[in-house]
């Protein structure tokens, strides 16, 4: 097949395994396949982050380097860094109905870490 040859349409052949599914079954299959694709990426992200990556994310979220460093250090201390420090800040902001900046500043004051540990399934650090 060269670049100018028209491809034969094989859509009907490729969709035979889906033809008998309802719209909601197709949607459920889509989300199931998406989970299969994304799961290894999440595992990789959880096991291959670093303090510098986490600080970089926080900098892009509007925090200064002087604010990002202690947030990352506390997430590491509490064994939460694998969830992404930016994600932790975002989660707190959505749960408390506050801005991302307000959530991060509250976390810098020590507020909200225990709830994050509970939500993300971690034991409270001693």
Image (spheres, rainbow, N blue to C red):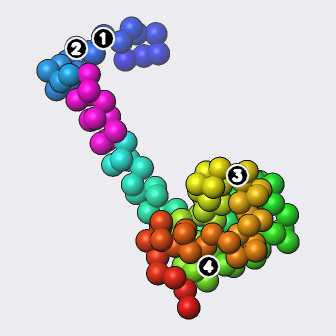
Q: Which residue is mark 3?
A: 98
Instruction: Check residue 12 in the rendering and tell me which mark sits there, or answer none.
Output: 2
Q: Are marks 2 and 1 in contact (CB under 8 Å)?
A: yes
- The residue labelled by disc 4 is 76
Q: Is residue 13 left or right of residue 67?
A: left
So how many labels did they put on this image?
4
Q: Which residues are magenta?
A: 23-33
Evaluate whether residue 53 shows in this view: no
The residues tagged by marks 4 and 3 sit, at their Cα atoms, a distance apart of 24 Å
- Estimate the spatial distance between the alpha carbons at disc 2 and disc 4, rounded to whole Å: 52 Å
Camera sees residue 45: yes
Front residue (pair 44, 94): 94
Residue placed at 68% from the left, 72% from the top?
111
Q: Classify residue 65 by image quadrant.
A: bottom right
Number of the front mark, 2 or 1? 2
Q: Nearer the viewer, residue 82 or 89?
A: 89
**Crowding near pointer 4: few (<14 within 10 Å), some, many (20+)?**
some
Mark 3–mark 1 Cα distance, whole angstroms, equals: 51 Å
Q: Are marks 3 and 1 in contact (CB under 8 Å)?
A: no
Q: Which residue is mark 1?
A: 9
């Amino acid at each position: 097949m060269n670049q100018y040859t028209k491809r034969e349409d094989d859509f009907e052949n490729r969709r035979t395994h889906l033809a008998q599914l309802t719209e909601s079954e197709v949607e459920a299959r889509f989300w199931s396949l998406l989970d299969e694709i994304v799961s290894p990426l999440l595992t990789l992200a959880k096991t291959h982050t670093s303090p510098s990556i986490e600080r970089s994310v926080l900098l892009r979220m509007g925090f200064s380097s002087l604010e990002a460093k202690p947030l990352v250090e506390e997430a590491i201390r509490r064994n939460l860094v694998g969830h992404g420090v930016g994600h932790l800040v975002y989660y707190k902001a959505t749960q408390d109905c506050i801005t991302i900046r307000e959530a991060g500043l509250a976390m810098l004051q020590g507020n909200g870490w225990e709830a994050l540990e509970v939500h993300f399934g971690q034991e409270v650090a001693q």
